[in-house]
Amino acid sequence: MGDRWHIEIDRGVCIGSGMCVSNAPDGFTLDSARQSHPTEPDTDANEQILAAAEGCPVEAILITLPDTGEAVFPPEE
């Protein structure tokens, strides 16, 4: 993939399902309130992070390109 990504969690939407941690255990953690946090908000693009975003039941994971802000996930319509 080669890109860098900026990862954000919409904590108003996150339901703490833990799917992100299951799909990308090195990319996400859950805090004591079961809210997701990226381990590195700016990271290299990788398939596990994308799978976590795609597998989030409420689409609380937002991935953008840090230089341009262009959406990687969810894709802009």
Image (cartoon, helix red, strand yellow):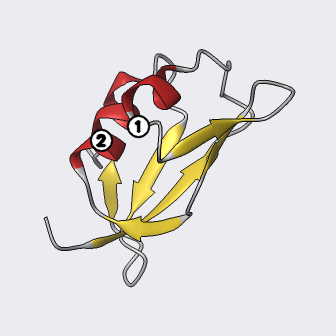
**What's under tag 2, amino acid-wise?**
Gln
Q: Quadrant of residue 56?
A: top left
Residue lying furthest left: 1
Callout count: 2
Residue carrying label 2: 48
Can you say which quadrant of the picture contains the N terminus? Answer: bottom left
Dot 1 or dot 2: first in sequence order is 1
Residue 55 percent location from the top left of the image: 36, 23
Residue 58 percent location from the top left of the image: 52, 21
Q: Residue at x 39, y 84 (%)?
A: 67
Q: Quadrant of residue 32?
A: top right
Compared across the picture, whether 19 is left or right of 50 comes to right
**What's under tag 1, amino acid-wise?**
Ala
Q: Residue at x 66, y 28 (%)?
A: 13
Residue 48 percent location from the top left of the image: 30, 41
Compared across the picture, whether 46 is left or right of 30 comes to left
Mark 1 surroundings within 10 Å by alpha-carbon count, few (fewer than 14), some (14 through 19), many (20 or more): many
**Residue 44 disc label:** none
Q: Tell me if label 1 and label 2 are in contact, CB under 8 Å.
A: yes
Work out whether residue 76 or residue 47 is closer to the camera in this orientation and state it: 47
Q: Residue at x 66, y 27 (%)?
A: 14
Work out whether residue 24 or residue 54 is closer to the camera in this orientation and state it: 24
Q: Is residue 74 visible?
A: no
- Relative vertical location of residue 64 with respect to residue 33 in this rendering, above or below: below
Work out whether residue 71 or residue 77 is closer to the camera in this orientation and state it: 71
Q: Secondary structure at mark 1?
A: loop
Q: Is residue 36 visible?
A: yes
**Residue 24 disc label:** 1
